[in-house]
Image (cartoon, rainbow, N blue to C red):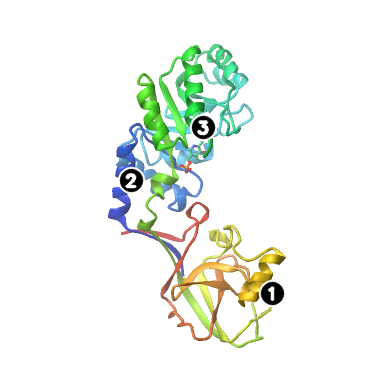
Amino acid sequence: MALTLRVTGDRWRAHLREVAGNNPGLVPVVKGNGYGFGIGRLARRVSWLGVDTVAVGSYEEVPELTSRFDGDVLVMTPWRPYRTSVPYGRRVVHTLGRVDDLRELSSRHPGSRVVVEGLTAMSRHGLTRPELAAAAGALGDLRLEGFALHLPMTGDRLGQTELWCTALQDSLLRTHTVFVSHLGAFELTTMCERWPALRMRPRIGTELWLGDRAALHAVATVIDAHRVSRGERVGYRQRAMPRDGTLLVVAGGTAHGIGLEAPTAATSLRARAIALARGGLDAAGFALSPYSVAGRQRWFAEPPHMQVSLLFLPRGVQVPPIGTEIDVDVRLTTTTFDAVHIL
Ligand SMILES: *Cc1c(COP(=O)(O)O)cnc(C)c1O
């Protein structure tokens, strides 16, 4: 009984090599649910890719990397003085986004390795350009490993990056390394050409691990099947079935992240009216599930449970045998699989 990610290994590895080849200085991002693979599994690939640094989202994730990879671990969430249980090992590189924090870290843990972040239009973390001079003065005994920029997905990203690189050059921050997040391929190439003295290091997660979607195949085991007739009540909520058909019990529930995707069921009154005219089950308040049977996405018979989901198959649809697997189209950054098979 499992929700499984099946990976076509050769194809996936070829894609990883290609992204690494196209992005000199690549810093793979390994964080959160490990992009569906799990952090540990990706941590082992990072050594295989031959990179010297990996970026994690949080301090809590650092030990998962340091135990499996012998390079540096850059933590992208900024260091703050109130943080507890921060690992201060030689291989940890901290991100700093406030002048006061630089001063504080320097006095508490002199010699720590840091990256200073600039506040882009993302408006998440970082120093403003006028603060760079003060940052240089606050570094004290910290070891500056680079500068970092996190760009939004749209807008004039090249212009913003250039503004920051100019400010960096004019500041007293002595570094030639710029870690960039979400800079497009064109912008990255242009930056490398125009700023040959800087070493641009792209931090990439999704495009690296999930960029070749055809190499990744999510499936769920069919656990049980029950014939139901129209009007028969099933599940926790005892909902009446809309027609005769089959109730399919499949692996995958809220614990795996099933049902956490943007809702696809019609929510507005207008959308419901359209659905009603079409005769769709969404008019009756049913939600479309990410599971497919016989080439079509099927309806949840009720909201997903913790580890299993109930699907309604109308009569006439070929019922998949118990123990076989059906396709499930999930977002890999929000799904936790029971098993990952790299073939
Ligand atoms: C998550 C994250 C990334 C990687 O994002 P992807 O879209 O997965 O490539 C890069 N930089 C920062 C700061 C992040 O938080």
User: Where residue 273 sits in the image (x, y, percent)?
Assistant: 68, 71
Residue designated by label 2 = 16
- Number of numbered discs present? 3
* Labels 3, 1: front one: 3
Point 32% across, 38% down: residue: 22
* Labels 1, 2: front one: 2
Point 66% across, 86% down: residue: 231
* Number of other residues with Cα within 10 Å of mark 1, as a class: few under 14, some 14 to 19, many 20 or more: few
User: Where residue 256 sits in the image (x, y, percent)?
Assistant: 53, 60
Left or right position of 214 against 286: left
Q: CA distance from mark 3 to mark 1?
A: 50 Å
User: Where residue 250 sits in the image (x, y, percent)?
Assistant: 51, 72
Q: Amino acid at mark 1?
A: Arg
Whether label 1 lies within 8 Å of ligand 1 gets the answer no
Q: Quadrant of residue 68?
A: top left
Which quadrant of the rendered structure holds the C terminus? Answer: bottom left
* Number of other residues with Cα within 10 Å of mark 3, as a class: few under 14, some 14 to 19, many 20 or more: few
Point 33% across, 45% down: residue: 16
Residue 237's label in the rendered image is: 1
Residue 156's label in the rendered image is: 3
Mark 3 / mark 1, whichever is N-terminal = 3
Of 320 and 18, nearer the camera is 18
Residue 335's label in the rendered image is: none
Q: CA distance from mark 3 to mark 2?
A: 28 Å
Q: Amino acid at mark 2?
A: Leu
Q: Amino acid at mark 3?
A: Asp
Whether label 2 lies within 8 Å of ligand 1 gets the answer no
